[in-house]
Image (spheres, rainbow, N blue to C red):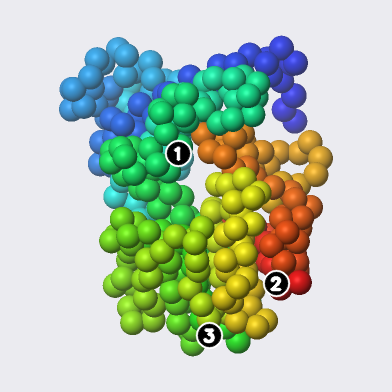
């Protein structure tokens, strides 16, 4: 039975945590996992191929190996199950997610979290001169990293979320700000008689996965702060409500309520933070949201209050194998 770390060690480990993030980002940027696909290699070979300093690379990989990301044996590094997820050739790679979470738009605001706490305002405008999504539109490289990273995360969670819901009797599924259509595609697989609508802005829809479940869904361009497509039996909002403050969320939800079919449901797919001190990834994500965006992760009670303001009521919460839960709302 392993002993709990000493109190001092807990503080030290937390203080040095940013170094691990930097090491992971470095391995992803240098595509070390891709370079190890063929089997174990010496750090000299890896450094030469990547065009970096051998000693410095070894120090980074040695640290990551301590956490089972890569393994050193007989003077050569090799993949581990965790490192394998960084290979870009995997259908569900986490390579892009690792780059997204460690890019400047998150790194810098979190680095000055104390200022965020003092002011109650996120760090995007002080650091980047624009709100989060405006900045991504203006800076194509940052936007591309973000959207690839979100797609990477979505590829892991879409099927478990869709499979956790009962789609019986559903004829029309509308995914609000559904990105490239990953969740909608998985939902349609689970609801073989349903049709779908993917609703998002034009620059996102241009990369929609229209060849999957082809003929069963269409793309509609629009702004969820202004309107929503009419006639849905189920409206999905995955990782959307957590981006915004309550007043903005009420606007989004109210726009859907105006046009949804009688008896329709709204599925908010976000973290639901449980009570107590136990571990939950939503607590980490919540502080990240506070740092860079106006939104936050919510408790079940906070969701219920939010829905009430939009003329809705919380009907149930469905926990899924993914980090996200399905919080279902219906007309009040």
User: Does residue 220 show up?
Assistant: yes
> Where does residue 203 sit, x and y in percent of width and height?
31, 55
Q: Is residue 189 visible?
A: no
Task: Give x and y (percent) for residue 159.
Answer: 50, 64
Mark 3 packing: few (<14 Cα in 10 Å), some, or many (20+)? some
Tell me residue 321's x, y (percent): 61, 58
Compared with 243, 8 (above or below) is: above
Q: Considering only order in the chain, which callout, 2 or 3, is on the residue closer to the N terminus?
A: 3
Residue at position x 60%, y 73% in the image:
258
CB contact under 8 Å: marks 3 and 2: no
What residue sits 71% from the left and 73% below the top?
331
Residue underneath mark 1: 132
Toward the right, the furthest residue is 276
Quadrant that contains the N terminus: top right
| Alpha carbon distance from label 3 to label 2 | 17 Å
Estimate how packed mark 1 is, as few (under 14), some (14 to 19) or many (20 or more) residues with alpha carbons within 10 Å.
many
Q: Mark 2 points at which residue?
A: 330
Residue farthest to the front?
A: 226
- Measure the alpha-carbon separation of dots 1 and 3: 35 Å
Position of residue 84 relative to residue 227, above or below, is: above
Q: Which residue is drawn at 18% across and 22% down?
A: 51
Lateral position of residue 277 relative to residue 18, left or right? right
């Amino acid at each position: 039975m392993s002993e709990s770390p000493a109190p001092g060690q807990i503080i030290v480990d937390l203080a040095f945590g940013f170094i691990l993030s930097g090491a992971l980002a470095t391995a992803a940027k240098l595509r070390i996992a891709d370079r190890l696909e063929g089997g174990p290699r010496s750090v000299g070979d890896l450094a030469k191929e990547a065009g970096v300093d051998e000693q410095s690379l070894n120090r980074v990989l040695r640290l990551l190996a301590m956490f089972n990301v890569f393994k050193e044996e007989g003077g050569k590094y090799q993949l581990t199950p965790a490192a394998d997820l960084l290979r870009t050739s995997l259908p569900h790679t986490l390579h892009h997610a690792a780059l997204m979470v460690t890019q400047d738009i998150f790194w810098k605001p979190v680095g000055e979290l104390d200022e965020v706490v003092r002011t109650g305002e996120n760090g995007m405008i002080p650091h980047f001169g624009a709100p989060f999504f405006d900045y991504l539109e203006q800076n194509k490289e940052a936007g591309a990293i973000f959207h690839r990273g979100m797609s990477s995360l979505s590829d892991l969670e879409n099927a478990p979320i869709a499979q956790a819901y009962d789609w019986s009797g559903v004829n029309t599924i509308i995914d609000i700000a559904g990105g490239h259509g990953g969740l909608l595609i998985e939902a349609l697989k689970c609801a073989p008689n349903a049709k779908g609508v993917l609703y998002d802005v034009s620059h996102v829809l241009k990369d929609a996965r229209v060849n999957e479940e082809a003929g069963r869904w269409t793309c509609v361009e629009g702004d969820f702060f202004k309107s929503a497509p009419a006639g849905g039996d189920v409206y999905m909002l995955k990782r959307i409500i957590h981006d915004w403050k309550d007043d903005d969320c009420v606007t989004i939800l109210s726009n859907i309520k105006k046009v949804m079919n009688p008896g329709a449901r709204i599925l908010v797919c976000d973290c639901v933070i449980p009570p107590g001190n136990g571990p939950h990834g939503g607590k980490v994500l919540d502080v990240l949201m506070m740092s860079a965006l106006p939104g936050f992760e919510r408790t079940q009670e906070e969701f219920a209050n939010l829905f009430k303001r939009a003329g809705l009521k919380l009907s149930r919460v469905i926990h899924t194998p993914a980090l996200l839960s399905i919080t279902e709302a219906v007309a009040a």
